[in-house]
Image (spheres, grey):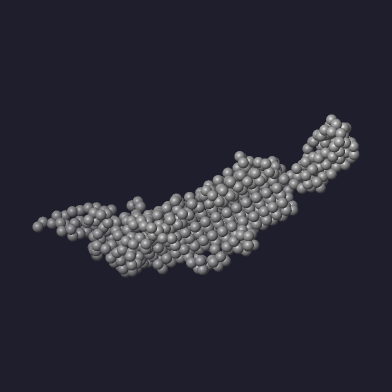
Amino acid sequence: MSMKKVSFKMGDWTFNYNSLRDFEFDISEPHNSYDYIIFGEDTDRDGIADAIYAKNGNSGKIEAKSNEFREIVDYVISRVSEFGRVVRIRIVGSFEVDNSSEPVNIPSNIYIELDGTLIAKDYTKTMVKASNVSNIWLVGVHGMAIIVVVLVGMFLLE
Amino acid sequence: MIHFDNVTNGYIRDLEVRNGYSRGIEVDYPDFVVVENVISHDNYRNYMHWVSPSDLKSWDGVAIFRNVKSYNANNNGFDGTSPTLIIDGFMSKGDGTSIAIDGYKRIILRNIHAEKGINIGAGAWTGNIAVDAILDGIYTNKIYMWFSVGANGIKISNVTVDASGGNGVELHIKSDSNVEYVLFDNVEVKNFAWAGIVLTRDSTVAGRFSVVEMTNIVARDGAQRGFYIYYVDYLRMTNCVAKGNDWRGFVIANSNYVEMVNCSAIKSGAYNQDGPLDLNTVTTFRAIGCHFETGGVNATLTSVTDYRFDGCSGNYPKTNNSGTTTFTGDGSTTTFTIPHGLVAQPSKYFVQPLNADARAYSSVSADATNISVTFDTAPASGTTLTFYWYAEV
């Protein structure tokens, strides 16, 4: 069976899929301006990525894949301390963030560029937290990045 | 949704944060955090900057909120207990209260559009540190600052307050500590329900405003008083205008040295039913080049021990006056009275008869209201009596 290639561009990168929907990344792309790129596929076309990838921007390799954004972002964050410098991460796409047990905890020395939407699974809880850390950038790009909780419920008075 | 807690060198930029159950962006115990170009809306509170009040004295971190927008917060657009806070470029619309801060050491608010008011408190729980505040370039419907601790300096400049109720700008002392320096410059306050510019204190405390300088202030079209200023040791008002306020132009009381230079109380409509100027218990008062119009009641001075009006016009409390008055005898009246219009009984006065019949008067006296000219024999009916008079307190 011949392999059929499908390509699409997202931002500065080109992504290729074969007929088996396995993801291939074009190593020739100028991808090393970020240490990690988190991106996803919206396979069911509901506007939220359900196949999420972590690409090492230096090697070009996909290091992690999951249907849970939280697993991918936690994996990338776990690697930050290895760099010994500010790590640049780019998040592209719309994702649901499982913050029901704890928020995404941001470590020191991290630059997160968000081009898309993060949707909190539990709108009553903190989604992103940086505590007792230093050198943090949380930046939206390409217009307005959105961190959003879609569920608009009753507000509780403090 | 986004919570920075004890972050050194943190930056949040170019984001929209919305529909959170509690805070959109919360910055606690910052060493240095910048929140810039952010829209936060439809959260319970859109922005929060917090340090425990008991730690305000020792915590020296800084948070900067720059070019941020807030709308539809169920509670406060910006809520803070902040050691050092800079907000530069803030737009609030549809929030419960635009900016509410209840503890700080030093605060700078610049370039603010706060639709639902600014409420800044210096709470006593902050360890009795004296605070500093700069408010510059603000459009809002209320500024209320209260002090349960002393203040070093409060600067309010380039402000428009289009009030929807209550007072326009109020500084309120709630302790025995003084607010040392208050500087107002280029402020317009309008459409207030009670008073435009208010400086006052709780009745149970002894704190005072030490030095207050007001320059280029307009308080207009309010339901009651333009300026309502109490408990100031040294107050100088320059180029201040109260216009079209229904009750009073300027109310100044329980103050020591008060100087008004080129100020005006201007009548408009029902303005000044209680007078353009109401001074009560002021040690020393000077008005230079001021204009006081009245809608019916003249300016009043009560327990003002030393006062002087130089080069003023309108219905100000005169300390000297003069005029020419003519009477016509009726054959029975022996005493003719001339209202001198002074604020108190004159210490110097005289009348000068301007025709032969007037020269027949026998004595002249004065009380707090009138100069009285007395004849031993009642001038005949139809006799013309013309006097020039002068009186001085």
From the viewer's perspective, is B205 left or right of A155?
right
Q: Say which residue appears at 57% left-offset and 54% top-offset.
A: B170
Q: In the image, residue A87 lies at what x, y percent?
A: 33, 63
Above-or-below relation of B358 to A3 = above
Q: Say which residue appears at 48% left-offset and 67% top-offset.
A: B52
Q: Say which residue appears at 61% left-offset and 48% top-offset.
A: B225
Can you name the residue that lies furthest to the front here?
Answer: B332
**Residue nearer the viewer, B307 or B351:** B351
Above-or-below relation of B47 to B360 = below
Q: Say which residue appears at 85% left-offset and 42% top-offset.
A: B364
Above-or-below relation of B380 to A104 = above
**Residue nearer the viewer, B335 or A141:** B335
**Residue nearer the viewer, B140 or A134:** B140
User: Can residue A9 be spotted in the picture?
Assistant: yes
Quarter of the image for the N terminus of chain A: give it: bottom left
Can you name the residue that lies furthest to the top here?
Answer: B382
From the viewer's perspective, is B147 left or right of B77?
right
From the viewer's perspective, is B122 left or right of B25?
right
Count every numbered label the image shows and give the total.
0
User: Can residue A83 be spotted in the picture?
Assistant: no
Above-or-below relation of A41 to B6 = above
Q: In the image, residue A102 lies at what x, y percent?
A: 34, 67
Q: In the image, residue B131 lies at what x, y percent?
A: 56, 61
Q: In the image, residue B261 lies at what x, y percent?
A: 66, 47
Quarter of the image for the C terminus of chain A: give it: bottom left
Where is residue B392, by image quadrant? top right
